[in-house]
Amino acid sequence: MPATAFTNHSPRVWIGCLACYSNGILVGDWFDADIANDVTIIDVHASWVDSHDMYCEEIYCLDSENIPERGGINLERAQAWGDAYDELDSDHLWPAYCAWIDSGMYSEDSSGVGCVSDFLDVFNGQWDSFREFAYTYVVDAGLLTDVPDELVRYIDYDSFARDLQHDYTVMDAEQHGVYIFRNS
Ligand SMILES: [Zn+2]
C-alpha cells in the first residue's frame, strides 16, 4: 500500500513500472523504504488500473527522499536503507546518519548500507562548530583542572581544535552547525 503518514526524515522511494516508463508513461507511487521488498507490480499500478498489462514486470525505485544515495536504486537497496532507519529508531538522528554516509567515512553492515551500531558509536553529536566541541572536550577531559586561571586565558583553542580535528570527521548539519564523528 502507498505510504500515508510520513515522519519527518523517513526514507521513501518512488517505485515505478519500467515497462510503462519505457512507453513514456510514469506509473508509480511513493512508498516507505522499509516496505520496498513487499511492493508488487499491482501496488505500483494501483491508481493506474488501465495501464497494467502483460508487459509490466519489473519495478524500480526511480526517485527517493532521505536516502543518502544518488540516482535510482533497486528495491532491495531501498529496503536496506529502510531497515537501517527502523533500526536507528530515532527520526531526528537520521540526517546525521545520512551525513555520515555522505562523508564516506562510514562502515557497512551485511546489507551494504551504513552500520547503525557503528554510527551510534562514533557520532559525537551536533555542535555550533568544531571549536565549540574542542572547548567542551578540554573542559570535560579535565585538562584545565590544575591550570591556574591566569594561564587559562592564554590557551589557543583554535590551534588545539585544529590538531584535535585530525581524529574526527566534520559534516555540515541539517539546519545549522556541524555533525561530528570520531574517526574509527
Ligand atoms: Zn506498467
Image (spheres, grey):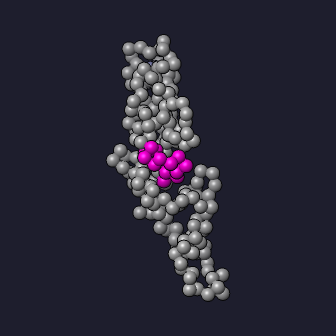
Which residue lies at the image location 66% right of the left edge and 87% below the top edge? Answer: 150
Give percent across and percent down for residue 37.
39, 32
Residue at the spot 66% in from the left edge and 81% down from the top edge: 153
> In which quadrant of this rendering is ligand 1 seen?
top left
Q: Which SS type dominates the magenta stretch? A: helix
Quadrant of the image for the C terminus?
bottom left
Q: Residue at x 48, y 12 (%)?
A: 50
Query: Would you say residue 14 is visible in this rendering?
Result: no
**Total numbered labels:** 0
Question: Left or right: 177 with respect to 119?
Answer: right
Queried whether the magenta region covers residue 104, the answer comes back as no
- Name of the residue lying farthest toward the left: 110
- Residue 5 in the image: x percent, y percent? 55, 33
Q: Residue 146, position in %: x, y?
A: 56, 86
Where on the picture, by quarter, is residue 105? bottom left
> In terms of depth relative to the viewer, which is nearer, 148 or 114?
148
Q: Is residue 178 left or right of residue 69?
A: right
- Placement of 52 over or under 37, stated as above or below: above
Q: Tell me residue 182's x, y (percent).
A: 47, 63
Q: Is residue 23 visible?
A: yes
What are the residue bounds of the magenta stretch? Answer: 84-100
Tell me if residue 168 comes above or below residue 95 in the rendering.
Answer: below
- Confirm whether the magenta stretch covers residue 90: yes
Residue at the spot 61% in from the left edge and 80% down from the top edge: 155
Question: Position of 114 compared to 12: left or right?
Answer: left
